[in-house]
Image (cartoon, helix red, strand yellow):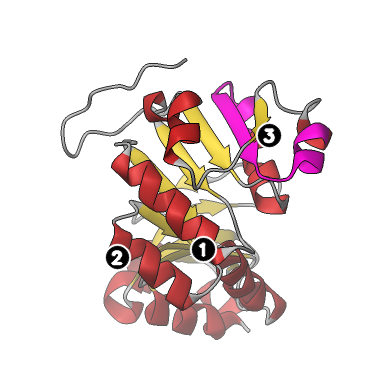
Amino acid sequence: MPNRKNGSAGKKLDARSIVVIGLGRFGTSLATELLREGREVLGIDADERIVQNMSDRLSQVVQADTTDETVLRELGIQDFDSAVVAIGSDLESSILTASLLLELGIPQVWAKATSTAHGRILEQLGVHHVIFPEMDMGKRVAHMVTGESLDYVELDKNYVMVKTEAPELFNGKTLAELKFRSKHGVTVVATKKGEGSYQPSYPETVIETGDLMVVAGSTDKVDEFCRMGV
C-alpha cells in the first residue's frame, strides 16, 4: 500500500496515491484520468456490477461498504495521500464516508456535492475540498451558450477566468492603451492570434479583432467585460 507523506501546514501535497469512492460517471472519469496521469488509483463502489465493469479499466478496484470504518482500515485507506468521495445519489453514504475519511486522517479529502445543502454539511464536517460538478458545468455552459465567453472557469467563489474573443472596438490598441484593469477591473493574462499559441500579456501587447484573450477577475467584472463583445 502507498505511504502517506507527512507535509507541514500550507505545503503543497503531491498526491501520488488516490482512492476514488463512487464509480458513477464523475468518479469513473476522474479515476481513469488520474490513472492516465500515472497516479496510483484505487476505485471503490458498493455495486458489484459496477466494480466488475471497471475491472478492465482500473488496475485496483474493489466492491466495499465505505460507511464501515473496519472495511476502510482493512483496505489501507488511511495510507493514501488523497481521497475523493464521488458518491452522488446516496447522501447518507456520502456524508458518512467523508466523515470516516477525515477520522482516518487522510491528508486531503475531496467530496462531490449534489446540492448546496449537501455541500454545506460536507464543509461543516471539515472536508478540505467540496466540489459541485453539475453546478459548475452548468455555469460554464451557460456563459458559452449566451456567447459571452468561449470558456469559463470558476477559480474561487467570486473569481473567474474566461476565454473570450476580442471585439472590434479593441482593434489595433495595446493593453496599456486599453487600461483594462483600471477601466474594467479585469486582467488580461494571455492572448492568442490566429492559429498561434497563447502568449503572456504585456503592456505593449497589441490586440486585434478576433484575438483570443484569457481574462481574469471578479465574477461580476469579468461578466460585464465579456458582454462588451456580444
Residue 206 visible within the image: no
User: Does the stretch in magenta take in 35?
Assistant: yes
Amino acid bearing label 1: Glu
Dot 1 or dot 2: first in sequence order is: 1
* Residue drawn 81% across the image and 33% down it: 52
The picture quadrant where one finds residue 159 is: bottom left
Which three-letter amino acid code belongs to the residue tagged 3? Thr
x, y percentage for residue 222? 44, 75
Asked if residue 43 shows in the view, the reply is: yes
Q: Earlier in the sequence, mark 3 or mark 1?
A: 3
Residue that carries the numbered disc 2 in the rendered image: 124
Q: Secondary structure at mark 1?
A: helix
Residue type for callout 2: Gln
Label 3 – label 1 distance at C-alpha: 26 Å
Above or below, 186 against 214 in this view is below
User: Which numbered disc covers residue 92?
Assistant: 1
**Above or below, 221 relative to 201:** below
Q: Position of residue 39 (x, y in %)?
A: 54, 24
| x and y percentages locating residue 85 in the rendered image | 51, 49
**Which residue in the structure is indicated by mark 3?**
32
Residue stretch in magenta: 32-52
Residue at the extreme left:
9
Of labels 3 and 2, earlier in sequence is 3
Decide: is 212 above or below 7: below
Q: Closer to the observer: label 1 or label 2?
A: 1
Mark 1, Cα crowd under 10 Å, few <14 / some 14-19 / many 20+, is few
Residue at 42% in and 51% down: 98
- Please tell me whether mark 3 or mark 2 is closer to you in this view: 2
